[in-house]
Image (spheres, rainbow, N blue to C red):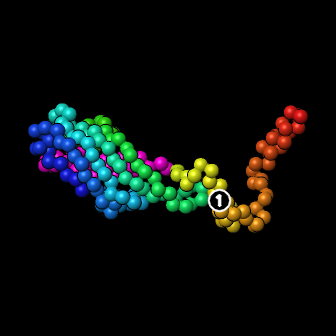
Amino acid sequence: MLRIDLGALRRGPIDMSQAVPADDPCFQNVELELDEPVQLSGRIMEAGSGRFYWHGRLRTVARSACRRCLKPVEVPVDQQIEVLFTEDEEANDPSAYLIPPRSGGLDPSEAVREELILAVPGYVLCDQKCRGLCPVCGTDFNESSCSCGNNESDPRWAALEVLRSGQSDERK
């Protein structure tokens, strides 16, 4: 993973551009698959005593499952990153990442991991018109209709059906 020398940062801003492999240890236990390396770019600069600011971009392609039909879907990720790193252990900023004491470098792995997780939508659709799966037999309604007899409506909706049918009678 990327490691930035704090001594070099104190001398001036550092422009960065690096590809982090999809199988890098910082992405372990992340519940998404990466189809491409994660492209990082941007500038890291000192932002006060013991504070460093990273302004850049994170780009990759992730793979997720459609929430209706479960088919794999490619999700392009292009996220702007604005992260603060600090050496101050007493900092009360929950969005700042702590640099370990007496560390000679800054490791943005945790920030990259979190920004990636936040950038990928929680629910993905293969198509806005995706019709999903039959809850009884599992037939993909995008490809065919099923004959399992799942024409019964859910009994929990019965009260609303009564209201809807009553309103349609009044409008006539």
| Residue ID at (75%, 67%) | 148
| Residue ID at (24%, 56%) | 1
Residue 118 belongs to magenta span: yes
User: Residue 67's x, y, as percent?
Assistant: 56, 55
User: Residue 91's x, y, as percent?
Assistant: 26, 37
Q: Nearer the viewer, residue 109 or 71?
A: 71
- Quadrant location of the C terminus? top right
**Which of the 4 quarters of the picture holds residue 159?**
top right
Residue 172 belongs to magenta span: no
| Left or right of residue 93, residue 123 in this image | right
Regarding residue 15, the answer to whether it shows in the image is yes
Vertical arrangement, residue 143 with respect to residue 44, above or below = below
User: Residue 139's x, y, as percent?
Assistant: 67, 65
| Residue ID at (69%, 67%) | 137
In the picture as drawn, the residue positioned furthest to the front comes out as 143
| Left or right of residue 41, residue 164 in this image | right
Q: Nearer the viewer, residue 129 or 30?
A: 129
Q: Secondary structure at mark 1?
A: loop
Vertical arrangement, residue 147 with respect to residue 68, above or below = below
User: Residue 162's x, y, as percent?
Assistant: 83, 43
What's the amino acid at mark 1?
A: Asn
Check disc 1: other Cα within 10 Å, few if <14, some if 14-19, many if 20+: few
* Residue that mark 1 sits on: 142
Q: Which residues are magenta?
A: 98-122
| Residue ID at (67%, 60%) | 141
Q: Nearer the viewer, residue 103 or 89?
A: 103
Regarding residue 86, the answer to whether it shows in the image is no
